[in-house]
Structure formats: C-alpha cells, structure tokens
C-alpha cells in the first residue's frame, strides 16, 4: 500500500466522521471513531494469527448463517478453545471472542440487529478485563454507548451505531489493513480531530513534524550525535504523553534504523487522552508487556514507579521526550520545595510550571541519556525563580542545545516555541543555538515544517554545524557575560546586516562621474560646433 493510499484511508475515515457526527462535537465523536478503528485492528490481527496457528484446520466462513471462520472453528472445537487461547496469549498476548470481533459486529450493523449496542458494550468490557493477561481497566470508559447524543432511547442509539459502524466497515473495506496502515490512519484522524479542537488539541497532540525532530534527537548517540543512531534504547519516557504519538515516533526511529527499544513509559493526566494512548500503543503493535502508561499528575508525581526514594533503585531513562502544557499555572505546596526533583534548584513560579515539568523529566534522565522538551520561549530569558533554575542547569553543564522554531506550528497556540536538549553528562562545553524561526512553509491557518526544514535542524544538531544567521556554538563565558540569558537572537541573529557605506569611496565615484559627464559634454559640443549649432 502506497503512502498515498494510507493518507486516502485516513481521509476516507475523516469524511465518514465528519458526515456522521451530526450534533455531536468532534471531541466526543473522535472517541467512538478511534475505538472502532482499534477494535478492527485487534480483530484483524487476531484472525490473521489464528489462521496461521490453525493452518489447514482453519475453516471457511459459514456465509449462510453469517458466521466468521473463527466463529465456526470455536463452535466446532469447544474443548480445544482454552488450549488454543493459551497459545494465542503466548504468541500475540491477547484473545478476542469471535462474537466480539469487528467482522461479527459489522455483520450485526449490516442487519440493523437490535443486539448490536448490547454486544458492543459486552465486547468493550470483555476487552478491558479478559482479552489481555494484564487488565486494561477503563480503556473504553469515555465511550458512552448510552449517551443521548447517539439517540434518545436504546432503539435510536442502536440504529445510529449500526449506521456509523456500517459506514466505517465500507470505508475500510477498500483498503488493506495491516497494523502499520491502520496505525497511520489512527494518527491521521487524531491530527484531523486536533485541527478541529483548537486550543484543546494541545492536551493530546504534538504535530508530527515537531515530534519527528524530538524523536530524531533522542535516538542519536547522546554523547556524540555525529556517530549516528543508537543501537538500543532500554527505556524511553514521555511524562505528558497525550495520545502517545511522540513515544511511538521514538520507537519507529530506532526500529527503522535497525535498533531495538526496551520498554515505553508514559504518563497522562487527562483520562480520555490516557485511554487514547493505551489504544494507540496496542494498535501500533506494541505488546502489553512492552509499555506502561500511567494515569496521573506528573507535577504531583503520583506514579509509584517514579517515587522510589532510594537512589540505587531509581528508574532512569536513556531517552526522554515531552511537550508539556505551556506556562501551566500550578499550586506547589511548601513541602514540594523538598521534593527530590526540585530541592537542588528551587520551585518554578506558580504562574508557569515549565521548569517544574523540565526538572521532573531531568531527574529521571540517565547519565548516558538525552532529553528533548518543547517549551515556550519565556524559559530562555524570564527572571526570578526561572533564572535561578536556568543558571544552575547552565553552570552544571546540562543544557546542550537550544532550538528556536517558527511561530504558529501548533493547533493550540500561535506562539513560537523552543526545544531544549538536556544531558546529565555532555561531551561539549559550549551550547549549540539553532535559530530556525524563518525556515517553514506558510499556511492559511497554520505554518508547517517541510522535510528539508526538519532535516536541516537534525543535521545541524547531529554535526554541531555553525552557519551564519542559522546556528552557532556559544561558549559558557559568553553566556555568563549575558547573565545566563538564552534568548536565541542574542547569539544567532537572522537579520541581514546593513551594508557599511564607505563615504570616501562614494565621494571618489561621484568625482569620477562628474569628470565623465564633463568629457561627454565637451565631445557633444564639438559635434554641435561642426554642425554650426550653438553649444549647450
């Protein structure tokens, strides 16, 4: 399937969503649409694995009675089902009963069956509690199948769901549906719903272009990026992970380069987005044992896994990426000043938790790791508590690179943002500044980064290149003279210097010009004299 077909699948599904949501707002309909796409993935993957496992014993579907091949096998081999499911759990880490599979649900929708809604409710509960060895409680908690937005009563809601599922089934049927393709469609829909959500989009979505920069940076060798991609990342963390796209980008970057990734860790405060992230992991083929997403508050640090007081047992990460909410207002308690994440630096101000998020992640960064975080430009130059935190990070040699991005790249805000790259132990004693504010493609509502813009940023970081009006390595002495202010334009100005005018040279040119004019006039008058005409 071509990239064009993958995009077309996403567009087809988006058109269906836009046509069918009716009075329901985009955020609510998103959860239904993505949940059905997720069910389709689980079902297809299970049926493909079952067919491979059963080989010649895999039956034909019973079209007369509208039963899938797997439903036929389950009926004919009831005594063998427990052993078969145990084998499937070993191989693909989950099972799904045939009556809850997408094909069975889609058949009920085609028939306008009165049992569709109840079957869906039972199926969602089954997936949450029984499909996987590890329960995914509340995975569908935000999908209210009893919502009046679907209809005033059970028959109306059932009818609406039949229409939605039938249309999705027809839309998907035109395309091959491997996990990569459905994963791409899922990401496309998240992006489309984000575009329609305005400021709320910041809660769950980092634009793919920016996500690509962060993931490229943390997958390069941390000490010397010019050596290329890491062979392995043991643990990666995104402590404000939204729908998980950034973590999946890191995974893809490493695996595409032939490397391996151990375990993915994410944290998300919003329950709806937390569920999106868990589905997104599974839909992209990440097994339930290969990721751990926690629903909780990063600033409070309520994740037991990250609350280990013993330094010897502290969990550390080779790669950390994050796009926390910009200048988030928070209310730190007095006790938090002694929190192990903050006590060496002091607390970020109540008006902006940007450095609180940064310090949280930085605490769990391994000595050989790299952290890339998106923040508003204010962190580079604001005074008070933020200046003290920034100064300590600089004096300790922890800020490696500062990247300025163009304005209006996000759905949620038009402000320009920066990427800070931090390391516990860095090889270079200077700070690399990249000023990419003028490198983008202008759009009607939103600007975007083209592949060449992204490559230029990553290549500049990788080789620590210096380029006039784009990038520069700045010594700590110079930064200290600027009182640890990291405002990018202080170090890399994008303005073109005005040409210095040499007045003596200008005067000489004017004299030469006067002389040439006088010579031309004399020649002209000579011609006039020969013609018997008066001179001018």
Image: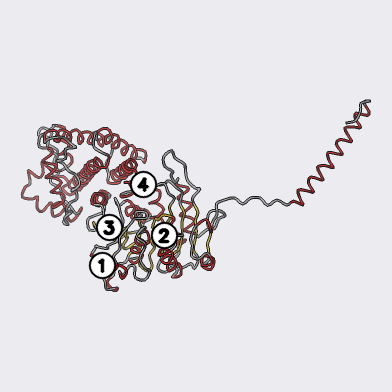
Labels 4 & 2 near each other (Cβ < 8 A)? no
| Residue where numbered disc 3 is placed | 267
Q: First in sequence, mark 2 or 3: give its number.
A: 2
Q: Name the N-terminal-most of marks 1 and 2.
A: 2
Residue that numbered label 1 is attached to: 307
Q: Which residue is mark 4?
A: 412
Which one is earlier in the sequence, the residue at label 3 or at label 1?
3
User: Which quadrant of the figure contains the C terminus?
Assistant: top right
The nearer-to-camera label among 3 and 4 is 4
Disc nearest the viewer among 4 and 2? 4
The image shows residue 304 at horizontal and vertical percentages of 23, 65
- SS for callout 1: loop
Discs 3, 4 touching: Cβ within 8 Å? no
Is residue 218 toward the left or the right of residue 313 in the image? right
Q: Secondary structure at mark 3?
A: strand
Quarter of the image where the N terminus is located: top left
Q: For the point 89% across and 34% down, which residue is it?
A: 523
Mark number displayed over residue 220: 2
**Which mark's residue is nearer the viewer, 4 or 1?**
4
């Amino acid at each position: 399937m071509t990239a064009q077909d993958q995009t077309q699948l996403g567009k087809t599904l988006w058109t269906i969503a836009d046509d069918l949501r009716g009075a329901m707002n985009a955020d609510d309909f998103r959860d239904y649409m993505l949940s059905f796409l997720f069910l389709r993935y689980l079902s297809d993957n299970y049926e493909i694995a079952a067919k491979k496992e059963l080989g010649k014993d895999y039956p034909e579907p019973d079209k007369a009675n509208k039963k899938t091949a797997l439903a036929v096998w389950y009926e004919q081999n009831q005594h063998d089902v427990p052993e078969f499911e145990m084998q499937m759990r070993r191989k693909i880490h989950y099972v799904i009963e045939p009556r809850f599979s997408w094909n069975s649900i889609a058949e009920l929708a085609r028939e306008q069956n009165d049992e569709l809604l109840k079957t869906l409710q039972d199926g969602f509960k089954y997936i949450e509690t029984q499909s996987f060895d590890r329960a995914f409680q509340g995975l569908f908690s935000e999908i209210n199948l009893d919502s009046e937005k679907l209809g005033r009563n059970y028959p109306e809601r059932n009818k609406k769901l039949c229409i939605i599922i039938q249309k999705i089934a027809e839309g998907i049927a035109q395309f091959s549906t491997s996990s990569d393709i459905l994963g791409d469609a899922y990401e496309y829909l998240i992006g489309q719903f984000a575009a329609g959500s305005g400021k709320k989009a910041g809660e769950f979505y980092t634009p793919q272009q920016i996500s690509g920069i962060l993931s490229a940076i943390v997958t390069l060798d941390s000490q010397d990026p010019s050596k290329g991609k890491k062979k392995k990342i043991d643990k990666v963390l995104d402590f404000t992970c939204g729908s998980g796209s950034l973590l999946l980008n890191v995974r893809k970057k490493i695996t595409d380069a032939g490397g391996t990734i151990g375990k993915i860790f994410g944290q998300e405060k919003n329950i709806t987005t937390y569920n999106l992230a868990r589905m997104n992991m599974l839909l992209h083929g990440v097994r339930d044992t290969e990721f751990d997403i926690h629903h909780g508050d990063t600033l409070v640090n309520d994740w037991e896994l990250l609350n280990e007081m013993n330094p010897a047992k502290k969990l550390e990460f080779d790669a950390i990426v994050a796009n926390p909410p910009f200048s988030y207002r928070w209310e730190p308690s007095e006790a938090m000043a002694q929190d192990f994440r903050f006590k060496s630096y002091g607390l970020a101000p109540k008006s902006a938790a940007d450095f609180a998020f940064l310090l949280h992640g930085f605490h769990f960064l391994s000595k050989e790791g790299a952290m890339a975080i998106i923040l508003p430009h204010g962190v580079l130059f604001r005074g008070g508590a933020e200046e003290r935190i920034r100064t300590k990070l600089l004096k300790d040699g922890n800020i490696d690179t500062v990247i300025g991005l163009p304005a209006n790249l996000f759905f949620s805000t038009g402000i320009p943002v920066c990427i800070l790259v931090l390391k516990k132990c860095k090889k270079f004693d200077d700070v690399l500044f990249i000023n990419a504010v003028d490198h983008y493609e202008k759009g009607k509502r939103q600007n975007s980064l083209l592949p060449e813009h992204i490559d230029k940023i990553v290549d500049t970081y990788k080789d620590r290149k210096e380029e006039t009006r784009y990038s520069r390595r700045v010594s700590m002495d110079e930064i200290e003279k600027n009182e640890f202010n990291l405002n990018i334009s202080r170090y890399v100005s994008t303005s073109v210097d005005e040409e210095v005018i040499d007045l003596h040279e200008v005067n000489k040119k004017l004299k030469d010009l006067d002389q040439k004019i006088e010579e031309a006039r004399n020649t002209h008058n000579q011609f006039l004299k020969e013609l018997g005409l008066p001179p001018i």
